[in-house]
Amino acid sequence: MYITQGLHRHIQAKPHATAIRYRGRGITYAEFGERVARLAGALKTLGVNSGDRVAMLSANSLRYIEYYLAVPWADAVVNPVNYRWSAAEIIYSLDDSQTTVLLVDDNYKGLAERIVAESKTVRTVIYADDGEAPQGLLSYEQLIAQSEPVEDARRGGDSLLGIFYTGGTTGFPKGVMLSHNSVAFSSMASQQSGRCNATTRFLHSMPMFHLADFAAMVSLFSSGGTHVVLPAFTPKAVLEAIDHERINEILLAPTMIQMLLDWCEADPAARDYDLSALERVGYGASPITPTLLDRARSMFPSAGFTQGYGMTELSPVATFLSADYHTPEHQKSGKMYSAGQPYACVEVRIADEHDRELPRGTVGQILVRGPNVMLGYWNKPEATAEALRGGWMHTGDGGYMDEEGFVYVCDRLKDMIVSGGENVYSAEVETAIASHPAVALSAVIGIPCERWGETVHAVVLLKPGRVASADEIVAHCREHIAGYKVPRSVEFRDVLPLSNVGKVLKVELRKPFWEGRQRGVS
Amino acid sequence: MYITQGLHRHIQAKPHATAIRYRGRGITYAEFGERVARLAGALKTLGVNSGDRVAMLSANSLRYIEYYLAVPWADAVVNPVNYRWSAAEIIYSLDDSQTTVLLVDDNYKGLAERIVAESKTVRTVIYADDGEAPQGLLSYEQLIAQSEPVEDARRGGDSLLGIFYTGGTTGFPKGVMLSHNSVAFSSMASQQSGRCNATTRFLHSMPMFHLADFAAMVSLFSSGGTHVVLPAFTPKAVLEAIDHERINEILLAPTMIQMLLDWCEADPAARDYDLSALERVGYGASPITPTLLDRARSMFPSAGFTQGYGMTELSPVATFLSADYHTPEHQKSGKMYSAGQPYACVEVRIADEHDRELPRGTVGQILVRGPNVMLGYWNKPEATAEALRGGWMHTGDGGYMDEEGFVYVCDRLKDMIVSGGENVYSAEVETAIASHPAVALSAVIGIPCERWGETVHAVVLLKPGRVASADEIVAHCREHIAGYKVPRSVEFRDVLPLSNVGKVLKVELRKPFWEGRQRGVS
């Protein structure tokens, strides 16, 4: 399979249907296909050969989608860059992957100068934006205008589709190598789960460099539907798009849902948007709390909520919780707090430190096997062998499985708090705190303690205009969870540090407590 | 991907759910998985090594499904045998594929003796049926009881899944090599088309050696549902099963639908069956006529009809016509008579004799590209190179494509009638004849003619109790199709020769006319 396959079908069957809408304008499948074939021609003229890496450093745009299709069309390999990283991390990832050609939009033309000066491998930079190209950069639109369309190389199967760098927030990033088949199987499994079909109008509101959005893009090219592109996530832009573009499907991190809700509550005019087109909200990156889900339901009453759990190394989904399990009944049964069951192309096992399968209900490491698993880490044979030992991807996440195969992700194993020999999973404590009516968001971490090794510490963000004391939070937790899991200390903040997918950056929260010390859990 | 993948998920998530029902009894996923793992263990003990071929010669049964899963589980390759073939053809296919182990049911124990005597490669025969094994045959049930379950080899990806012999009705059969990925992509595309989900109760009424049924089986193991197995197709058994087993999905050839309808019309008691559970009827092998579809609709009012067009070499589907196009509106638009649009993992092109793409509406050869295409013909590098030249599977079928990518299959190219230099496609003439109220079924062939090369000849089967003359049929056709397409001769029969998938065997009909002559179209 090859990720450009769906594009060929839609050019043939509905050349005049709208493929993509961006900044209020539409482009048909035929027009889009022509631009992709010309961009691929331009890349070949620039000396891009089979398997070469071509990077993109840009906010979301129509051209970002063209890049994703044109690179494999030209028999090359994509390398979408995380623009939240430092310049040093970005240059590291470009040089590590020996990327020669880089595309940038107007936001990153300044950074491009530094990259050209410092990178050992990047030799060509294309200005993928409107208007004239700055000095030293090639014009994307001129390349498209001047190049002849070429035949699709149909790069596919187990060959390398892209190098997706990950982990930049916790050290130098690792390049995850994914094949066309891995992403294609994941995309077909997502459609088997009821996501993306020919009538879908999908809103790209998450960063396109992130695999969650890219995988949704591939699904949508497979099923045929319309991509609507937001340059970046803002609550106002998302709600406007749902209304004006009749968006029926969207992916959001729980913190993005939170921001949408907070923005609406703060501004009554926001209630005027017509959000009734929305049918499916996919969330991931972290579980949703019951409180947040209840609020989200009242905002999007027409939508079903689904959860995907996974990581870049898994193209990216491992387990899926369907809308059927987002009900009061499954709030009671507990299934609503699970990450769902293995995806249609995935096997999951919960294992001990020797990779032996554990009984149901026992917490261990989540292992994953299937065609969605990465080929390996670029240029890191040891890390690859370690992650894929025994044929299973070792996620590094802790979790357990119930009798019906539902997986409960407790927390990143390295985030697990070991207090007095007892394991405390942050997610459970956070769920308890979130059910307090004054709480908007919380993050629970372990902090050093002479006596217990670590103790449970909660960082809490209150809802606007609400108050609660540390004692109230602690008393509330005591009603819901075991004594040793109750936070020993509570701290209030006005803002929490978030990653590009809206995860709370616990590394940042932990830093001041652990400076100069070593945590026991690796 | 590997075809045993779904089985692992269902054993984990719903071990006590019914996987298969056969002869009124059910077997759970856990029990079925245990038997598969033990049968795989037995095969290994019998010396079956990685990539060895293991054949099955049997009517449909629970054990047939166990065979299909256990062989790849043991890292071996399936070879399901077409039991309609002559002994010579069967032995040819076993020796050609160097099959060493053969499973037979009670129907074929006699044939097994001859195979053992004449085959150069078969050295072990397993009696896969109830009761004691005949002299010289191993007992399937004893093997299962005595063998330890083994770990699944998880044979998969582009490795060989099976050799599926085809073409036995027109000469010695060719072995089509399909990989796990080919069948897996096809199976996931079928679910994308709305077939097979976790609540499906599928009736295996077509022969299990046929790829159409096998592909449905793989889909159902992917989605998780219940297989209900009929040993063989009879109208009574099918209707009884739909009623008693609450079947909601079935695959049928149009001639099978015809037989069901005729049987019901002949016996009013048949109307007592409750057929209301049926939701999806998939048909293929040949297009359905409007008359037949109307009758089928009145029999199965709750069902949507879908068509798949393809061949063994395509795992097996190339194009798919959804239920949405089986409406009076699309009877008028003509789309109902098409074979639908390319499947979700398939590209289709209509090409001239030099493989150049033809304009829409022009008849040419149907070419197919995608991950569903076979690896090649076993031991036939020249036939493989010829069939797959330029990266496209050459189907040998004639057809055209409309502006929206719908494919209209005219006929097998070799069945096309060339009369006075004009091409006549049998399907078009058959559709015209079928719309005559007295006609049950017809087959249109070319017969030799000094003046025109060939002329159009119709073989017609009337409905029970109805009469029509040859002149009436000709006059009726004259109203619907061009003069040169109207049959020059009409012949009435009480029965038509059918293949195992219910296709009229035109080879048989042509034989008496062409004995000792050469047809111009190859």
Image (cartoon, coloured by chain):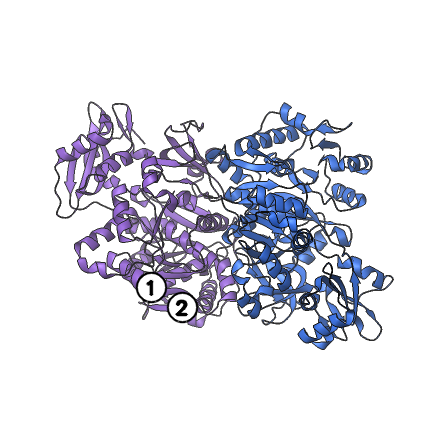
Chain colours: A blue, B purple
Identify the residue shown where x is 28% and y is 51%.
Answer: B84
Q: Which dot marks residue B245?
A: 1
Q: Is residue A245 left or right of residue B406?
A: right
Q: Quarter-wise, where is residue B414 in the image?
A: top left
* Residue identifier under label 2: B27
* Residue A138: image location, x then y, percent: 72, 28
Q: Describe the element under mark 1 as helix, strand or loop.
A: loop
Q: Where residue A181 sits in the image (x, y, percent)?
A: 56, 47
Amino acid bearing label 1: Glu
Q: CA distance from mark 2 to mark 1?
A: 14 Å
Quadrant hosting residue B491? top left
The chain identifier of the residue carrying mark 2 reads B
> What's the residue type where badge 2 is placed?
Ile
| Residue sitting at x 22%, y 26% | B483
Residue A483, relative to residue A160: is it above or below? below
10 Å crowding of disc 2: few (<14), some (14-19), many (20+): some
Q: Position of residue B172 (x, y in %)?
A: 33, 43
Total of numbered circles in the picture?
2
Q: Is residue A186 above or below residue B445?
A: below
Residue drawn where x is 76% and y is 43% of the image: A90
Q: Is residue A248 above or below residue A496?
A: above
